Amino acid sequence: MQSPTTLMGFLESAGFKVRVYDLGRRIQKISRKNFEKFEQQEIVYPFPLQQQAWLALSLLQNQNQAQKQNNNNEPVIWFLRFPLDETGKLVLASRDYFLHRLLEASVTNGNGGNDGNDQTVSEAALKDNPHVFKPREDKMAIFHAILTHSLKAPASRFYPHAIEYFSGSQGWDQWSFVGFQGIADLSVRFREDHNEQLIGNAIAHIPAQPLEALCQCLENVEIPLNITIALDQRLHQEISTASPNTSLISFICRAVSLSESKTVVNDLLQHVLTSEVASQPDILSAVSARNWQRLSEQPNAQLYLDALSSSDQETFNTCLADLLYLPGIRNNLLAVIRDPQRPNRLREKFGHFMQGFTKVD
């Protein structure tokens, strides 16, 4: 029997149902069809970060295999990263190396890894593997919330505490007992248990730290209009203060990135990018890393590049290099940069940016 030539093919032939998620720019599901096309170099990776694909694979055994092995059939999670070439497509050598490790471990284990020792195969293939990474704890918590919800599994034990806090019944200053996992569960399940109204009402009252945690979670879900408006109002209030909290503003910018209301988000971003805090690195990063799709619109691209050119050269280089690697954004940004009417500081910053690519070692 011919060995599988793709990672998806190998895992499905081993009896797993595979769910694939991007863990780079935000946590979002990648369809089986698109992941197959990515593996076959038919499409570029849709969400590159630092010229890599950051992936989470949920592997769930089929029912018969799970019963045979007498386990509770909880998914096994792999966190993998693969480099992308200059066009944004998978570097096949990296995937082939990882697949070779899997095949090698399966042969060593016997029966292609289907004799009840799949865990042994996984450990052997993943140990000291350069394509394996460990996400930050907050990322892990959000991913866990999204995955358990998609599998129709119960939320964590922290979920009731989060509901109680966001109801305001215990006082808005009593947030220290609320676990981040509970906030993640609440954010993912905002359509349940009247959570949408709960979150929308709480945003105006909660202190900066729990609000930032909430925003970290909301950036991974498509939030409704009422939550978007509440975040927009909180952002306007913060910008109008004598000493705006730029960290909080950046988190709010991230939180609205998947809002169902493009109009409110566009207005919010334009307000931020024309404010006195527009050139702050954390705010510029929040726009490029989470709201990159909005930069396909010319007015937004112009405002962003104007603000970016007012920042330091390192921030300019980092954000622009990241954006120019994204599908569908590059040409629009370059059109603004090449416009004869562009500001002088944009021309100068871009000139220094290009010098980094033309230096001879």
Image (cartoon, rainbow, N blue to C red):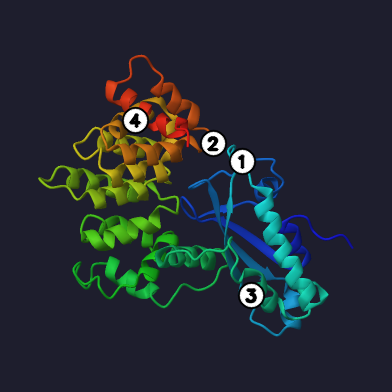
Mark 1: few/some/many CA within 10 Å (<14, 14-19, 20+):
some
Question: Which tag, 2 or 3, sits closer to the chain's start?
Answer: 3
Q: Which mark is residue 213?
A: none
Which residue type carries mark 3? Answer: Glu
Question: Closer to the observer: label 2 or label 3?
Answer: 3
**Residue found at x 41% / y 78%:** 157
Which residue in the rendered view is the most extreme toward the bottom?
70
Q: Picture quarter containing residue 132?
A: bottom right
Q: Quadrant of residue 283?
A: top left
Ranked by sequence position, the earlier of labels 1 and 4 is: 1
Q: Which mark is residue 44?
A: 1
* Residue placed most toward the observer, 203 or 28: 28
Q: Is residue 317 visible?
A: yes
- What's the distance in space between the residues labelled 2 and 3, CA to CA? 35 Å
State if disc 1 and disc 2 touch (CB < 8 Å): yes
Q: Amino acid at mark 2?
A: Pro
Say which of 125 and 341 sits in front. Answer: 125
Q: Are marks 2 and 4 in contact (CB under 8 Å)?
A: no
Label 4: how many Cα within 10 Å (few below 14, some 14–19, many 20+): many
Assign the N terminus to one quadrant of the image.
bottom right
* Residue indicated by mark 4: 305
Q: Earlier in the sequence, mark 3 or mark 4?
A: 3
Whether residue 32 appears in this view of the structure is: no
Distance from disc 2 to disc 1, alpha carbons, whole Å, reads 8 Å
Q: Which residue is mark 2?
A: 327
66 lies left or right of 340: right
Q: Which mark is residue 123?
A: 3
Query: In the displayed image of the protein, which residue is found farthest to the left?
Result: 242
